[in-house]
Amino acid sequence: MTLILEGERHTIAVPEGETILSAALGAGLYVESSCEVGDCGTCKLRRLSGAAEQDNDMGLTDEEVEAGYVLCCVGRPQGPGLVLSDER
């Protein structure tokens, strides 16, 4: 998985079943977060490519879901090629 945070690209491995947020923090990357259960939307990143599943998307508006945002605290990559960005 690739994260683009503050303009810098970071490619990290995400063990199966681990959330994007957990993998990012484990790799020493900072992703802003708060509730960590998918309700607040603080950890949302925009999906540029690839696929992710989320246990809960209550922290996203319908427009954000359509625009491809993913909640990192409850999101997990689905296959290779996931690229997420913090650019709004």
Image (cartoon, helix red, strand yellow):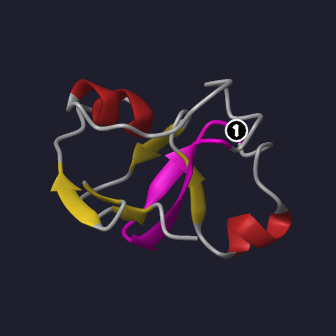
At x 21%, y 63%, the residue is: 9
> Can you say whether 3 is above or below 26 in the image?
below
Q: Is residue 57 left or right of residue 3?
A: right
Q: Nearer the viewer, residue 81 or 8?
A: 8
x 25%, y 54%: residue: 1
The residue located at (79%, 72%) in the rendering is 63
Does the magenta-highlighted stretch encompass residue 40?
no
Residue 19 can be seen, yes or no: no
Specify the amino acid type for callout 1.
Answer: Asn
**What percent of the width, then of the height, locates residue 33?**
57, 33
Residue hosting label 1: 56
Image quadrant in which the C terminus is located: bottom right
Q: Residue 28 at what x, y percent from top left? A: 23, 31
On screen, residue 60 above or below 59? below
Hey, which quadrant is residue 69 in on the image? bottom right
Q: Position of residue 62 (x, y in %)?
A: 83, 65
Residue 57 visible to the viewer: yes
Give the residue at x 37% y 52%.
78
Q: Secondary structure at mark 1?
A: loop
